[in-house]
């Protein structure tokens, strides 16, 4: 294996990295790019043309795939910014539609802009009536995420007037439709799975309350919502709205780079989010709690979690990006305890177990040293369980919230003059070229 030496050179105006192939003594100078936040980035776009080399980075953990102005994360410091605003401040003071406007447009809305945006979203929440028949094609026991993938992908068959990606107006109409209709699609998937009638959206309710109404109300009685629960739901939506270039957002961008219509791109994002390593993490938390079963067994499972040879993993603790405390978890922790108190769920054995596990993990030297703090998935799973959502709906709610991040990144990608169709390279390790052998001569 030959080696490549890197040399960083700094000048008054520019920085660059010079790569030297020790075997051939060839070199190439690559510029360093500077973002407004975060580390410098080596621009390798000319690397193959000038050297014949590719880079190898499974999982893209050290590769910047795009330039973006939407979200910034500093995992070491536990920082998450949306358009420059700390997530803690947005979760404390803003509403989800306000965050949606910010992600889409780059600035927080004025009172007049907010009123117009909320009005627009409210009047896009209904689905084409024929879509209700589409639901009947699914088995009653279909997973709600399977239904979401199918229904969202089919929206392009119903809304032909917002699929021209070269038209800025149609792109914005499609964005508004996706943000507005996703709660309705999700709620209908849930109602279908439990055999209850669909509840149509109401324009007089705010975004979070409308979703709770569509999932929890029934036609035979008046629906009353607890403001603490609706505020917790609003915060869940805010805290899941966007998270930079994660797997599902990257999937949306990759699908969109081919020129696919926006509904197909979002359906691709939903499929990616469905994975247990991504959107299914809060679902995995509840499954883990049921596996532990009782507070008395916590020491046993903590011991197993510390054993490298044991396949058991403590779900909902630590984060791939955050090497410090997940800033979203701090806000979610507060909402979690508020909801449990408001709904008087202190005696629920699973929720009681979760709170005890949180307490022990926060005091355990092993978890403190490894910085395995409870993350957003730990608390959101507990909240959703307390509200009454089945585990199968957890990732669905994640998709409802993340839709705005997906469409914001999709719009940014379409407007990027340097955007190209995604085409990753590979390190091929298969057989070298060989001749075809006739079937009768093979041994």
Image (cartoon, helix red, strand yellow):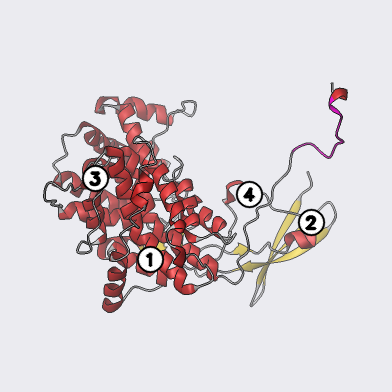
Per the model, the C-alpha gap separating discs 1 and 4 is 36 Å
In this picture, residue 306 sits left or right of residue 338: right
Q: Is mark 1 on a helix, strand or loop?
A: helix
* Residue 186 left/right relative to 217: right
Between disc 2 and disc 4, whose residue precedes? 2
Q: Residue furthest top?
A: 443
Residue 176 is tagged as: 1
Q: What stretch is highlighted in magenta?
A: 430-439
> Would residue 99 be counted in the magenta stretch?
no
How far is disc 4 from disc 3 in space, using C-alphas?
49 Å
Label 2 or label 1, whichever lies nearer to me, is: 1
Q: Name the residue under label 4.
A: 57
Find residue 391 and report its horizontal and vertical position in percent.
32, 38
Q: Is mark 2 on a helix, strand or loop?
A: loop
Question: Label 3, on which residue?
Answer: 197
Q: How far apart are marks 2 and 3 (CA)?
A: 61 Å
Residue located 62% across and 69% down the image: 418
């Amino acid at each position: 294996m030959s080696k490549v030496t890197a040399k960083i050179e700094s000048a008054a105006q520019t920085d660059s990295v010079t790569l030297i192939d020790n075997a051939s003594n060839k070199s190439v100078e690559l510029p360093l790019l500077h973002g407004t936040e975060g580390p410098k980035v080596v621009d390798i776009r000319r690397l193959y043309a000038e050297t014949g080399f590719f880079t190898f980075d499974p999982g893209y953990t050290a590769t910047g795939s795009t330039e973006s102005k939407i979200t910034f994360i500093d995992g070491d410091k536990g920082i998450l910014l949306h358009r420059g605003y700390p997530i803690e401040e947005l979760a404390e003071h803003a509403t989800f539609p306000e965050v949606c406007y910010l992600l889409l447009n780059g600035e927080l809305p004025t009172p007049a802009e907010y009123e117009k945006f909320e009005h627009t979203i409210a009047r896009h929440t209904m689905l084409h009536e024929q879509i209700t028949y589409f639901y009947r094609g699914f088995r009653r026991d279909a997973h709600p995420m399977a239904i979401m993938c199918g229904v969202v992908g089919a929206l392009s068959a119903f809304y032909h007037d917002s699929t021209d990606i070269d038209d800025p107006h149609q792109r914005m109409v499609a964005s508004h439709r996706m943000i507005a209709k996703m709660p309705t699609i999700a709620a209908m998937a849930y109602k279908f799975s439990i055999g209850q009638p669909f509840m149509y959206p109401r324009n007089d309710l705010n975004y979070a309350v409308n979703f709770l109404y569509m999932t929890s109300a029934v036609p035979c009685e008046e629906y009353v919502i607890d403001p603490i629960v609706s505020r917790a739901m609003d915060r869940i939506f805010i805290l899941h709205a966007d998270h930079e270039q994660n797997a599902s957002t990257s999937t949306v961008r990759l699908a969109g780079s081919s020129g696919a219509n926006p509904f197909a791109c979002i359906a691709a994002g939903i499929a990616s989010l469905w994975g247990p390593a991504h959107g299914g993490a809060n679902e995995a938390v509840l499954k883990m709690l049921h596996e532990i079963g009782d507070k008395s067994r916590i020491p046993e499972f903590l011991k197993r979690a510390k054993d490298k040879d044991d396949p058991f993993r403590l779900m909902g603790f630590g984060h791939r990006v955050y090497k410090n405390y997940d800033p979203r978890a701090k806000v979610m922790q507060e909402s979690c305890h508020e909801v449990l108190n408001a709904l008087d769920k202190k005696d629920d054995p699973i929720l009681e177990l979760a709170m005890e596990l949180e307490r022990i993990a926060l005091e355990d030297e092993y978890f403190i040293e490894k910085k395995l703090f409870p993350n957003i998935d730990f608390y959101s799973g507990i909240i959703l369980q307390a509200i009454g959502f089945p585990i199968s709906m957890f990732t669905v709610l994640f998709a409802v919230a993340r839709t705005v991040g997906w469409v914001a990144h999709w719009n940014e990608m379409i407007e990027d003059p340097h955007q190209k169709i995604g085409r990753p390279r590979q390190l091929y390790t298969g057989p070298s070229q060989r001749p075809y052998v006739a079937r009768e001569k093979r041994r």
